[in-house]
Image (spheres, grey):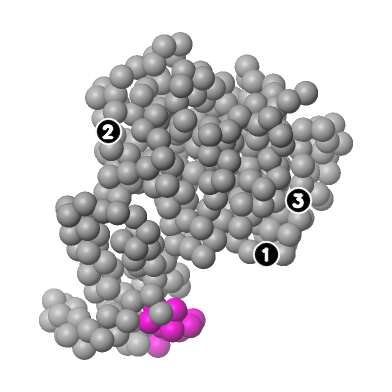
Amino acid sequence: MNNRIAIVIPYYQKQQGILSKAIRSVLAQTGVSDWHCIIVDDASPVPARSELASIIDAHAARITIIEQANAGPAAARNKALENIPAGTQYVAFLDSDDEWTDEHLANALTALEQGYDFYFTDHYQLNQTVSAFKRAKRIQVEQHRQLSGNPHLHAYEGDMFDQILRGNIIGTSTVVYRYASFPQQRFREEFVYAGEDYLFWLDLSRATPRIAFSDLIECKYGEGVNIFAGSGWGTEKSLIRLHHEMKYRKAVARLFPLNAQQALENRRIVRGLRKSFVADVLHRLMHRKPMDGVLTKQFDVDPLSFVNFVPLAISVLLRR
């Protein structure tokens, strides 16, 4: 039987019970039966096969596990995309610590089969009780035309490329797209943890304006392995987070044709990240916190962080 939908799950977790929750949310999907799930075990400390031992036997024909040396989520998703079964029309992404609501795939198909190529939904981010759309306030649902078949489905009417640049509203685990039209589309592995998912959405938004979304909360993010969890100001991971944000912003300017306003805004963000990076380094120096090799990585991405270090440091210190 041909499967219309391939579900891609990159997997790396240190705790048991996380992946099985994600898979149970897949198995609970209503109104859609023609799917196949590809899990790429990225050298997870808790192996996928042992994690799913109680599930896999009953669903072996619908779940494929691929094991690889650790290479990060972008490479894991790409490995799955390289192994999509023939005849697949759509690909849905689900991170291994997230869970879908039961109607997610059915809603996606209702939208996509009206001629749309790219679908995303509202969702709960980690430890949140207010949805991502409501928290960010970047999408006004009433401004987007309703689709037939479900009053919660809408055609996105705007410039999604510009929207992502100004403030991304797309959650990875909510995305379903028309794989058959974009079979060569891949994540940029060199930007692992540096917005590789945002870059994928930017590529798709340039390739097609036919984008739909659901205002329903169709996914709940869970607490698994996350490089940016607990990465607020002055924390252990804050410096590496700033480095990755800088790497993403520098990549945007290099990889995509930006209009004058977009280029100006991107440069403004880069300057702000540069100053925040210097402030974080000063904080670490004063409190004798480790840098963990981030300085060398930052120099490769943005030498101006160091060329302008002294004036930026003076600016930071004078504001205190």
Q: What element carries label 2?
A: loop
Q: In what quadrant of the picture does the C terminus appear?
A: bottom left
- Per the image, label 1 sits on a secondary structure element best described as loop
Asked if residue 123 is positioned above or below residue 312 in the image, the reply reads above
Report crowding for label 3: few under 14, some 14 to 19, many 20 or more residues within 10 A (C-alpha): some
Give the residue type that dot 1 points to: Asn
Can the viewer see residue 312?
Answer: yes
* Whole-percent x, y for residue 128 in the image: 42, 42
- Image location (x, y in percent) of residue 187: 53, 53
The residue wearing badge 3 is 66
* Residue 290 inside the magenta-drawn segment: yes
Q: Where is residue 272 in the image (x, y as percent from the top left)?
A: 23, 67
For the point 26% across and 49% down, the residue is 166
Horizontal arrangement in the rendering, residue 169 relative to residue 31 (left or right): left
Residue 303: image quadrant is: bottom left
Question: Of marks 1 and 2, which one's residue comes earlier in the chain?
Answer: 1
**Distance from label 1 to label 3 (Cα)?**
12 Å
In the picture provided, is 320 more to the left or to the right than 252? left
> Pointer 2: residues within 10 angstroms few (<14), some, or many (20+)?
few
Residue 40 numbered tag: none
- The residue indicated by pointer 1 is 70
Asked if residue 203 is among those painted magenta in the image, a careful observer would answer no
Q: Give the range drawn in magenta.
A: 287-299
